[in-house]
Amino acid sequence: MTVHRLRPTVFATPISTGVHVRGWASSFTIEGGAGLWRVWSALAGQLAAGVPGDQLAAPAGLPPEVRRAIEGFLDQLHAHDLLVEVPQGWGESGVAELPPSGVARWLEAVAASPASTWSRLRDVTVEVRGAGPVADAARRALRDAGVRCGDEPSGHVEPAGHAEPSGHAEPAGRDAVGQAVELRTVALFARDRQGRVVAATGAGCGDEVAFVTPVSTAGRLPAVVAELAGRLRAVPAADPPVPLAALVGGAAVHRLLASVGGLLDPAEEIKIADGPPPEEPAGPVHPAVLVARMDPLRASYHPWLGDAGAAPTGVRDRARREPADAGPAAALPAAALPAAAVDLAVALRRLDVLCDPELGLLPPPEPADLPQVPAALAIADKVLGIGATADAARLDAGLRAAERLAGDGWVVGVDARHAAGVALRRAVHAARNSLPGADVPESSWADSPAARRWWKALTLRFGIDARVRVRRLAPTAMHAEIIAGGTVLAWAVEATAADAVGLAALAATGVAQARAAGVAVTTGGITLNGAAPGWLPPEPDTGGRSTPNWHWPAGIAEAEEKLQRALEPLVGPPPEQPLTAMVDPGVLRAGFALTRLPTIVGAHPQRVAEVVEVRS
């Protein structure tokens, strides 16, 4: 026999017009007067004890208003997944085949079907490999959870590079300078009744920092631990701080049991609790690593760009909380070229992954002490980013820094169209002197508010004695360059003369602004382009309060397809070359696109100062 109960995470508050009920990740309000609180109190008391399914309705004989109130509460509790079905006697001590009371309440709070989840947990034995405070904490957590714990017979702690239960040997990890990392960590393997490893996770703990890996495969776990230890520079300590060891030991068990039981990974729970996840096009999945530090004791999840072997399993439908397929998730791709168009919000989220402060490959782009007017500026790894807004400057700095990470000849974009657009523009600029074209008069761009604004900022505000040259390379392709003292300060290639001059002037203004602030920026022409995503309001303004000029250069991308079709006959399309091992896969795993510069017959294009470095 089963009964329906309120989840332990449900709380209610009386309000002047009714009752507000809240759960772990959702809430609702029933209005109808202060008397609703009495109805809720009586109903909640019965649901806390458990109500059989055939009795889960408003009793007969009650006044119509009370019946409607009870039905309204029950409908909303079902809709918000705040009721759970459990066996009779669930959570009571001394009942055979049922979990301890603490575990029972945990499963009531998080599982779609607590009894089914408990059955899965009882079917596995967790092998703890390791010794010391972290292993001790993991074993305590397993005992408290009522899960069988089996230790490695010798108790020996295996270093990275040992053979896993599958018999597959993993290579030793490398730290940032390529030196071998000697690891003494704890590994947890969940085995089914046939002895097969169904999930694995690991933890490492040093004096100041500790981590818990994503749920992975047995064969990949040693390499994942080695990579994380190298990234965090976490040297496992013989006697780590007890609070830090206890935190990661328990967290490792939590992640493993959540995977085995078909529950949400703890990192996913935090995301949902923070609010509805934003819509994002299909792309790489970034497993989360728990990173914990001392002084003060704290822990948070961070995206991991390495190949974890498998994404966290057990991710459920966020609305109905249904268990997912318990089978292993697909491994992260070694390389991919995202083709789906990416907007600014998605690009910035992927940039945050690439520049995560704990596990990212690059330092986060920051405005630092740079002035932010008239142009927005940011610095990432000593690379200057320029934009019309702070977000655009951060993205510009991050992409330029990522190109240095990718290596010479590679172009990094937020998506395939952006990467191709950048490559074509650079090839056209490199071959500009050999391409036919006609000069365009100033009148073709002088009436553009954006071009005029940034040209005045460069020449009047910063006093740069500059001139503009605009050439029409094709009916829908304009090349603009800003020259001062015989040197090209900035250039741009766009579909219209106004947009090309506007972006070139914005880029030149950003460099002049940084130099005026005392920042030593390398010389050479720089570029911004309209292929990058920009922010636009979700709905057009029909009240006449704003115009597209307010959001420039966001609207330039509308002409990108036409521009690229005009540029390809001039220099050829970017070559389709395989992504070799020379390219850091982290850039790809973050969700960005890479392509190569086109090969131009009779010319030798190089990366023409597309990275604006800040001298130390």
Image (spheres, helix red, strand yellow):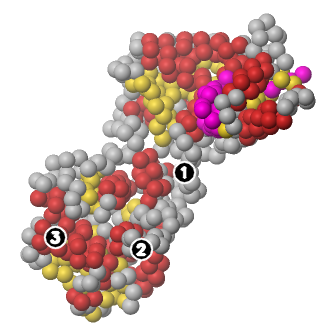
**Residue 272 can be seen in this image:** yes
Query: Residue drawn 34% across and 46% down?
Result: 364
Residue 132, how many percent across, how many down?
Answer: 49, 12
Q: Any mark on residue 544, and which?
A: 2
**Disc nearer the start of the sequence (3/2):** 3
Are the residues tagged 3 and 2 within 8 Å (C-beta)?
A: no
Q: Which residues are magenta?
A: 1-30
Residue 50, how many percent across, how many down?
Answer: 80, 21
Q: Any mark on residue 595, and which?
A: none
**Disc nearer the start of the sequence (1/2):** 1
Residue 118 falls in image quadrant: top right
> Which mark lies nearer to you, 1 or 2?
2
Instruction: Indicate whether 114 appears above or below 610.
Output: above
Disc 2 residue type (three-letter): Gly
Secondary structure of the residue carrying tag 3 is helix
Residue 413, how many percent across, how many down?
Answer: 42, 62
How many numbered marks appear?
A: 3
How far is mark 1 from mark 2, CA to CA? 29 Å
Mark 1 sits on what residue? 278
How far is mark 3 from mark 1, CA to CA? 38 Å
Query: Residue drawn 53% across and 44% down?
Result: 286
Q: Quadrant of the N terminus?
A: top right
Disc 3 residue type (three-letter): Leu
Secondary structure of the residue carrying tag 1 is loop
Crowding near the residue tagged with mark 3, few <14, some 14–19, many ≥20 C-alpha atoms within 10 Å: many
Decide which of 359, 220 is in the foreground and name it.
359
